[in-house]
Amino acid sequence: MDSKKLDIARRFDVPEGEISAEPYGNGHINDTLCVTVSAAQGQRRFIMQRVNRYVFQKPEEVIRNIEQVTEYLRGVIASEGGDPQRETLTLVRTKDGKTFTYDEDGELWRMYLFIEDTISRDLPDTTELFALSGEAFGRFQRQMGGFPAASLVESIPDFHNTPARYAQLMDAVARNAAGRLGEVEEELAFCRAREKDTHALLDALAAGEIPLRVTHNDTKLNNVLLDAKTGRGVCVIDLDTVMPGLAAYDFGDSIRFGANTAEEDERDLSKVQFSLPMYEAFTRGFLSEAGRVMSRREIELLPMGARLMTLECGMRFLADHLNGDKYFRIHRPGHNLDRARTQFALVRHMEENWDAMLDVVKRA
């Protein structure tokens, strides 16, 4: 552990003892270390992270969101007879009482208690596992159901504003910065044909049909810690993108990720299919918890959330391709275009299975 990180770790209120650290996890945004403190009474582990200031330009607002959400969750979990230190993240304060510290380069660091005896999985390779993921994120929605969502800030403005993402794509078309417009006519026609759809969720919000909620906004399976013995979901992690939003966002992003039979950048689009059994499993798990606090109209719009989050992601990939691959890291020429095409293929398959998707929600 280099002296800089050792100095940062020692600023937090951890036990006295020998400190070591090593890189932890496979996240793409923040630098994450597992810090181990060895003392006479045994070892304690902590997670220490540098918040990516390029992605989160106001990191203190991110921390304030996390403080509010985890404090609220601890109260709900305790009232339900659970273990707040195991079932939600716990920020470790610095020795002067703060929940973060800055290094000499102006980068913000934070620390969490390590939640022992848990594992994470990257891919939901069975319907049972995907149902557990749905249950965990649905529980997060239910437990946050009484929290005033509008009191949180948008850690990334317009993150899931689908009409804004469409406008950004059209701006990329107008600028054609990388000179690639000629190769994406089919993809742009696909998006233009669905421009009206992009407004569906926000129009329902504006009309008062659905409420603003606290949303996680990165509902992948690897953001759920599973009990190492039982396999059940223990804790939802990675709360950096927690902000005001719609329940359909969290539901839809999970479906986009977990009900796709192919990799996100699959070139052979014949391999891209929408898995109705995976969709049904997640829906069942999600609504077993979130359904207790959601309105009927919110539930009816969940399938639209799946379509729009997939379309939105595809538009973001396509815009970045046109802009010269400035945002998403690529590993080959045309990588972002491949990603966009995969998302659009998945949207087509959702549209082909639309009646079945609606029926699953009704039955669940």
Image: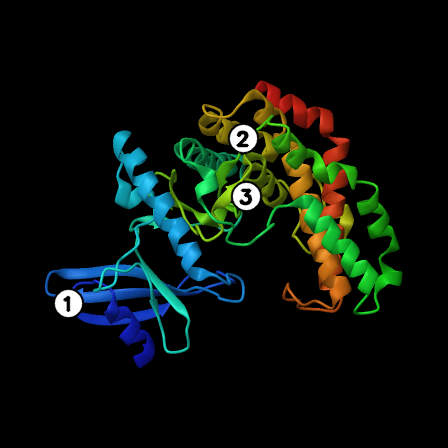
Read off the residue under disc 2: 211
Residue drawn at point x = 29 percent, y = 44 percent: 86
Q: Name the amino acid, label 3.
A: Asp
Quadrant in the picture for residue 210: top right
Task: Return the residue nearer the eye: 285 or 195.
Answer: 195
Question: Mark 2 falls on what kind of element?
Answer: loop
Q: Nearer the viewer, mark 1 or mark 2?
A: 2
User: What percent of the width, then of the height, locates residue 234?
Assistant: 36, 41
Quadrant for the C terminus, please.
top right
Left/right of residue 348 with respect to residue 236 in the rendered view: right
Q: Which mark is residue 125?
A: 3
Q: Name the amino acid, label 2.
A: Pro
Task: Return the residue nearer the eye: 341 or 277.
Answer: 341
User: What percent of the width, then of the height, locates residue 292?
Assistant: 45, 23
Question: Mark 1 falls on what kind of element?
Answer: loop
User: What percent of the width, then of the height, locates residue 155?
Assistant: 50, 53
Task: Tell which residue pokes out farthest to the top in this image.
Answer: 363
Read off the residue under disc 1: 16
